C-alpha cells in the first residue's frame, strides 16, 4: 500500500484550467492538425466551431488547439467575447499579437508596418466621437499600443462587416508572405453582437473564397450554430462544427488513472464505477470528484468507500462555485422559470424514462408556461434574460435547455 499525499494531488478543477490528462479529445486534435497542414499547403479548409455545454472543456480544448498552431509557427491570438463589447478592440489586440509572432520572420518590415497602420485605424474606429461625434470619455480613449501612424482608407469605414473583411484579408496576406497562417481563437462566441457575428461570417466567407491562410476557431454554447445561421444563411456550410460532449467511460477513467499512475497511486474498479456515476463523464466534474477523492483517500488503491466519503465535499464545492454562482445571477422571476424547467426535466426520471437533466435535453416552453399557469408571452422576458446570461439556450424552436450539466438536479435539491 502507498500513502496518498494530498500535496501531490494532480487534479485541476478550474475554469479553463488544463487537466493533467487531456483524455478523449484525440480526434479533435488530429482534425485540427490536418486543417493546419492543409492550409499551409494551399488547400481549401473551413474555420472551426466547437460547441457544447458548460464544463465539457471547450476552453481547454481551444487553448490546446492554439498551442498546436503556435507549434507549427502560425501567428495566433485569442479573445473572449462579451455581450457588452464590440469586436473591434479585442480582435485588433488578437491580430496584433499574431502579426508580432510572424514579424521576425518577415523580410519586409515596411509591409508589417503597413498592416499595423491598417490595424490601428480599424481599432480606433471603435472610439466614440471618432468622426465628428462628441469627444470620447476618458475611459474610451483607448490606444492599441501600435507605434506606427494609423493608415486611411482601409478597414476604417465604420461598417464592421466591410472593415473586418479588409482587415483579415490583409492579415492573411502577411502570413502568406512568410509561408504560414494566422489563427484567431474566440471563446464564448455566442456572446458576440449580431452585427459582429454577421461581419465575422462575411470575413470567413471571403477568406475561404480566396484560399487565404487565416482561420477562425470559435467555441460556444450548443446554440452557437443557430446564432451563426441567423446572421448568414450560408454559415451552415461555411464552418466545420464539432460538438464537444462528455467523456465516455474509457476516457473518463483515463483522465483519472493516468495522472494517478504517475504518482504511483491506483484506483479499485468499483471506485472508478462510482466516480463515473457521480461525474456523468463531464470533464469539470471528473476533476472535481477526483480531487476531493484524492484528498480523502488515506492510501492506494483508492476505494469506493473513499469516493463515498469525499463526494459530499465535491458536491458542496460544485454547489457554491459551479451551480450557486450562476443561480445567484438570476432574478426571482428567472429562478422561478428555471425551477419549472428542473421540475419538468426531473419528471422523465420519475416516470422511468432516461433522466434528462445531465444531458442537453430540451423542455418545451409551452410545458413550462402550463406548469406555472402563465401565458407563454408573459414568460418571454425571463426566458430571454436567462439566454442572454448564458444559463439556458434554445437549440430548437419552442424548447429550452440548461447550459450547465446537472443543473436541473441541483435546483431540485434547493429549497424554494
Image (cartoon, helix red, strand yellow):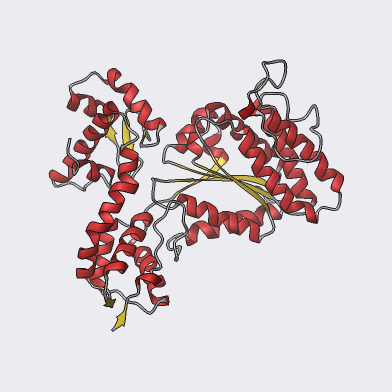
Q: Residue furthest left?
A: 351
Is residue 301 rendered to the left or right of residue 349? right
Seen at 34% across and 47% down, the residue is 322
* Residue 405 in sight: no
Seen at 67% across and 60% down, the residue is 72
Is residue 139 rendered to the left or right of residue 298? right
5 in relation to 101, above or below: below
Picture coordinates of residue 12, whole percent (x, y): 41, 61
Q: Residue furthest front?
A: 138
Picture coordinates of residue 329, whole percent (x, y): 35, 35
257 in relation to 197, above or below: below
Residue 303 sits in which quadrant?
Answer: bottom left
Residue 370 sits in which quadrant?
Answer: top left
* Residue 295 in sight: yes
Picture coordinates of residue 234, whole percent (x, y): 56, 33
Q: Quadrant of the C terminus?
A: top left
Seen at 22% across and 57% down, the residue is 312
Is residue 293 rendered to the left or right of residue 184? left
Q: Quadrant of the N terminus?
A: bottom left
User: Number of callouts in the render?
Assistant: 0
Picture coordinates of residue 179, whole percent (x, y): 76, 54
Q: In the image shown, does 347 or 123 lie closer to the viewer?
A: 123
100 in relation to 412, above or below: below
Amino acid at each position: 500500500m502507498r500513502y496518498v499525499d494530498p500535496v501531490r494531488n494532480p487534479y485541476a478543477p478550474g475554469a479553463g484550467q488544463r487537466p493533467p490528462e487531456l483524455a478523449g479529445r484525440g480526434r479533435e486534435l488530429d482534425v485540427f492538425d490536418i486543417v493546419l497542414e492543409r492550409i499551409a499547403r494551399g488547400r481549401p479548409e473551413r474555420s472551426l466551431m466547437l460547441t457544447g455545454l458548460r464544463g465539457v472543456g471547450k476552453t481547454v480544448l481551444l487553448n490546446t488547439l492554439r498551442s498546436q498552431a503556435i507549434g507549427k509557427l502560425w501567428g495566433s491570438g485569442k479573445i473572449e467575447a462579451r455581450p457588452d463589447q464590440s469586436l473591434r478592440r479585442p480582435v485588433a489586440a488578437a491580430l496584433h499579437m499574431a502579426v508580432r509572432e510572424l514579424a521576425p520572420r518577415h523580410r519586409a518590415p515596411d509591409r508589417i508596418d503597413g498592416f499595423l497602420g491598417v490595424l490601428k485605424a480599424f481599432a480606433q474606429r471603435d472610439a466614440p466621437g471618432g468622426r465628428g461625434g462628441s469627444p470620447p470619455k476618458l475611459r474610451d480613449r483607448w490606444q492599441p499600443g501600435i507605434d506606427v501612424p494609423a493608415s486611411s482608407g482601409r478597414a476604417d469605414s465604420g461598417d464592421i462587416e466591410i472593415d473586418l473583411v479588409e482587415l483579415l484579408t490583409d492579415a492573411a496576406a502577411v502570413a502568406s508572405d512568410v509561408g504560414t497562417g494566422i489563427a484567431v481563437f474566440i471563446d464564448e462566441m455566442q456572446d458576440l453582437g449580431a452585427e459582429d457575428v454577421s461581419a465575422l461570417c462575411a470575413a470567413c466567407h471571403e477568406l475561404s473564397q480566396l484560399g487565404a491562410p487565416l482561420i477562425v476557431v470559435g467555441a460556444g454554447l450548443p446554440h452557437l450554430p443557430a446564432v451563426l445561421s441567423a446572421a448568414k444563411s450560408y454559415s451552415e456550410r461555411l464552418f466545420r462544427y464539432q460538438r464537444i460532449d462528455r467523456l465516455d467511460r474509457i476516457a473518463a477513467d483515463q483522465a483519472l488513472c493516468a495522472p494517478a499512475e504517475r504518482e504511483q497511486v491506483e484506483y479499485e474498479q468499483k471506485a472508478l464505477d462510482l466516480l463515473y456515476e457521480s461525474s456523468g463523464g463531464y470533464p469539470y466534474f471528473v476533476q472535481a470528484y477526483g480531487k476531493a477523492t484524492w484528498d480523502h483517500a488515506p492510501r492506494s488503491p483508492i476505494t469506493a468507500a473513499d469516493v463515498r466519503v469525499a463526494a459530499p465535499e465535491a458536491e458542496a464545492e460544485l454547489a457554491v462555485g459551479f451551480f450557486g454562482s450562476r443561480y445567484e445571477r438570476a432574478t426571482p422571476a428567472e429562478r422561478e422559470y428555471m425551477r419549472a424547467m428542473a421540475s419538468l426535466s426531473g419528471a422523465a426520471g420519475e416516470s422511468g424514462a432516461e433522466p434528462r437533466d445531465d444531458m442537453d435535453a430540451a423542455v418545451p416552453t409551452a410545458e413550462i408556461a402550463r406548469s406555472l399557469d402563465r401565458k407563454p408571452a408573459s414568460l418571454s422576458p425571463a426566458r430571454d434574460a436567462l439566454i442572454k446570461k448564458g444559463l439556458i439556450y434554445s437549440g430548437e424552436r419552442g424548447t429550452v435547455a440548461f447550459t450547465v450539466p446537472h443543473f436541473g438536479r441541483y435546483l431540485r435539491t434547493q429549497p424554494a
